[in-house]
Amino acid sequence: MATISEILTHKWPGSQWNLEGGTYAGLVWMGATAKPLEAEIMAFSVEVDGILVQIAAQERWRDLLANADGVLQAFEILSDAIADLQAKARVTSALTQSNINKISGLVTKLAQIRAG
């Protein structure tokens, strides 16, 4: 459940307030408008929960994209190493061409993600 602070930040942007103890009783409203009622604030809890979930998902996606180069490089190295091992050892049981193709497909998808 969204906190009073999170709700005020998202639903009353630009308002000036101070919150002590995280409860409505500790809310000091300094905004030009009237202090919202506790029930009015809490009525936005579910909506702000959704906003916070979206923000967290966007941050995870941004982190994934920031790390995509490293992941892509790791998959490229792995794919090359498997192909090299298979060629040198002539291994066909555990590392089939199908498995190598799947890894190559992952490398291609990561390259597409990196390209944006």
Image: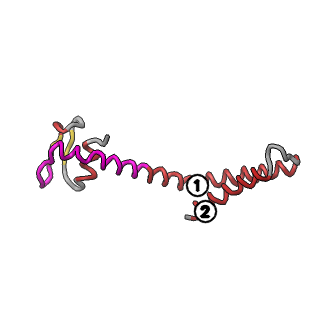
- Say what amino acid the circle numbered 1 marks: Ala
Measured from the top left, where is residue 73 in percent x and y?
A: 66, 54
Decide: is 113 above or below 20.
below
Label 1 to label 2, Cα distance in Å? Answer: 10 Å
Q: Residues within 10 Å of mark 2 (few under 14, many from 20)?
A: few
Question: Which mark is nearer the camera, 1 or 2?
Answer: 2
Identify the residue at horizontal 82%, vertical 48% (top origin): 85
Give yes or no for contact between labels 1 and 2 (Cβ–Cβ under 8 Å): no
Location of mark 1 (residue):
68
In the drawing, does residue 67 fall left or right of residue 39? Answer: right
SS under mark 1: helix
Mark 1 surroundings within 10 Å by alpha-carbon count, few (fewer than 14), some (14 through 19), many (20 or more): some
Going by the image, does 32 lie left or right of 9? left
* Residue 16, image x, y percentages: 19, 51
Residue 112 is a magenta residue? no
Q: Of helix, strand and loop, which one carries label 2?
A: helix
Q: Is residue 18 above or below residue 107?
A: above
How far across and down, in percent of the image, does residue 31 sit?
15, 52
For the point 23% across and 46% down, which residue is it?
43
Relative side of 75 to 44, left or right: right
24 w.r.t. 44: above or below: above
Residue receiving disc 2 = 112
Measuring from the top left, give residue 38's x and y in whole percent.
17, 42
Q: Looking at the image, which residue is at 15% across and 48% down?
A: 36
**For the magenta stretch, what is the residue range?**
30-56
Does the stretch in magenta take in 40? yes
Quadrant occupied by the C terminus? bottom right
| Quadrant, the N terminus | top left
**Residue 94: which quarter of the image?**
top right
- Earlier along the polypeptide chain: callout 1 or callout 2? 1
Looking at this rendering, what residue extends furthest in the bottom direction? 115
